[in-house]
Image (spheres, rainbow, N blue to C red):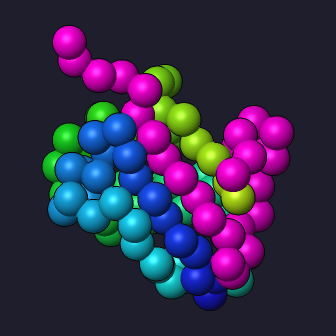
Amino acid sequence: MPVVELTFGGGLELLVGGQKKLSVDVPGESVSVGMLIDWIRRNLITERHELFVQGDSIRPGVLVLINDSDWELEGTTAYDVASGDQICFISTLHGG
């Protein structure tokens, strides 16, 4: 079970009870970011899932960083999560 640090910003923290940082134990031996996203949707987000996910991935307009690196450089949803990883989700969509 990897233990990962999750950070939510740009308003996404409102979807997880206003918590900007969480340390979570993700069940499973080999967990991809895609599986983590689904786990977050099912276990941490209680409403308005559509503001976080679209289909099987993150919705457009949400920046994902894995250990301070753009997730597209790490393989997006295929990246295998390891204990100690820091995964940050930041919404770039704001009202105005």
Q: Quadrant of the C terminus?
A: top left
Q: Is residue 42 visible?
A: no
Q: Quadrant of the N terminus?
A: bottom right
Disc tally is 0
Which quadrant of the structure image shows residue 86? bottom right
Q: Residue at x 81, y 47 (%)?
A: 74
Q: Is residue 18 left or right of residue 36?
A: left
Say above or below: 47 vs 72: below
Residue 83, magenta (yes or no): yes
Say above or below: 5 vs 73: below
Seen from this angle, which residue lies furthest top? 96
Magenta-highlighted residues: 68-96
Q: Nearer the viewer, residue 42 or 79?
A: 79
Q: Is residue 1 left or right of residue 46?
A: right
Residue 34 place in picture, x, y as percent: 61, 52
Q: Nearer the viewer, residue 56 or 16?
A: 16
Residue 33 place in picture, x, y as percent: 64, 56
Seen from this angle, which residue lies furthest bottom? 1
Residue 60 place in picture, x, y as percent: 49, 24
Residue 93, magenta (yes or no): yes
Which quadrant of the structure image shows residue 95? top left
Q: Residue at x 48, y 33 (%)?
A: 62
